[in-house]
Image (tube, rainbow, N blue to C red):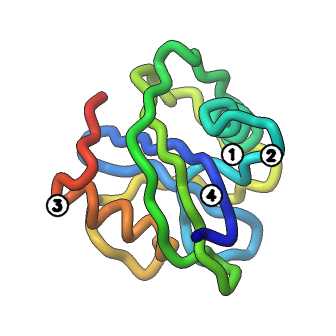
């Protein structure tokens, strides 16, 4: 069982995955955050994307992709990510609040990507999770 339960947005454009980084941390991760008590994971994903990227997601265009578990970053713990996709555009996304970087990554391993996101990339590449925008 995971130590940390989060909801996150998986947004792929032109075969590249949108990731963010916060403050002084080196690695990039999915936009999202911890699920609060009594909050539905979809609502967490929508709230966190607004807080981190200043984008209002249309709930009707947010769809469940699946769950991924992996090493949390930077904590020494396991994170469970309830992953969602978005049919709309994130063209207006900007760094907001604690976010210090936004970047699109190829769907391959990189030393700049958080470990749980690498688990997601492996699942996407092996078709264990199917991203359908």
Residue 24, percent from left and from top = 74, 75
Residue 111, percent from left and from top = 43, 81
Residue position for label 3? 126
Residue 65: image quadrant is top left
Residue position for label 2? 36
Residues under numbered marks 3 and 1 in contact, where contact means CB atoms less than 8 Å apart: no
Please tell me which of labels 4 and 1 falls first in the chain.
1
CA–CA distance in space, label 2 to label 3: 31 Å
Mark 1 or mark 2: which is in front?
2
**Relative vertical location of residue 61 with respect to residue 122 in this rendering, above or below:** above
Circle 1 sits in a helix, a strand or a loop, which is it? loop
| Along the line of sight, the residue nearer the viewer: 18 or 63 | 63
Residues under numbered marks 2 and 3 in contact, where contact means CB atoms less than 8 Å apart: no
Q: From the viewer's perspective, is 99 left or right of 106?
A: right
Please tell me which of labels 1 and 2 falls first in the chain.
2
Residues under numbered marks 4 and 1 in contact, where contact means CB atoms less than 8 Å apart: yes
Q: Residues within 10 Å of mark 2 (few under 14, many from 20)?
A: few
Residue occupying image coordinates x 57% and y 16%: 58
Q: From the viewer's perspective, is 104 left or right of 54?
A: left
Circle 3 sits in a helix, a strand or a loop, which is it? loop
Please tell me which of labels 3 and 4 falls first in the chain.
4
Residue 20, percent from left and from top = 58, 56
Residue occupying image coordinates x 41% and y 52%: 104
Residue that extends furthest to the bottom in the rendered view of this protein: 76
Circle 4 sits in a helix, a strand or a loop, which is it? strand
Please tell me which of labels 4 and 2 falls first in the chain.
2
Residue position for label 1? 95
Residue 47: image quadrant is top right
């Amino acid at each position: 069982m995971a130590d940390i339960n989060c909801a996150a947005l998986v947004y792929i454009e032109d075969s590249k995955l949108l990731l963010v980084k916060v403050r002084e941390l080196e690695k990039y991760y999915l936009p999202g955050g911890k699920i609060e008590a009594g909050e539905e994971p979809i609502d967490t994903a929508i709230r966190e994307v607004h807080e981190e990227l200043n984008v209002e997601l249309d709930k009707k265009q947010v769809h469940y992709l699946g769950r991924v578990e992996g090493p949390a970053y930077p904590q020494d713990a396991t994170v469970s990510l309830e992953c969602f996709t978005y049919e709309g555009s994130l063209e207006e996304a900007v760094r907001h609040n604690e976010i210090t970087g936004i970047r699109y990554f190829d769907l391959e391993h990189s030393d700049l990507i958080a470990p749980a996101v690498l688990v997601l990339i492996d699942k996407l590449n092996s078709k264990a999770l199917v991203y359908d925008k």
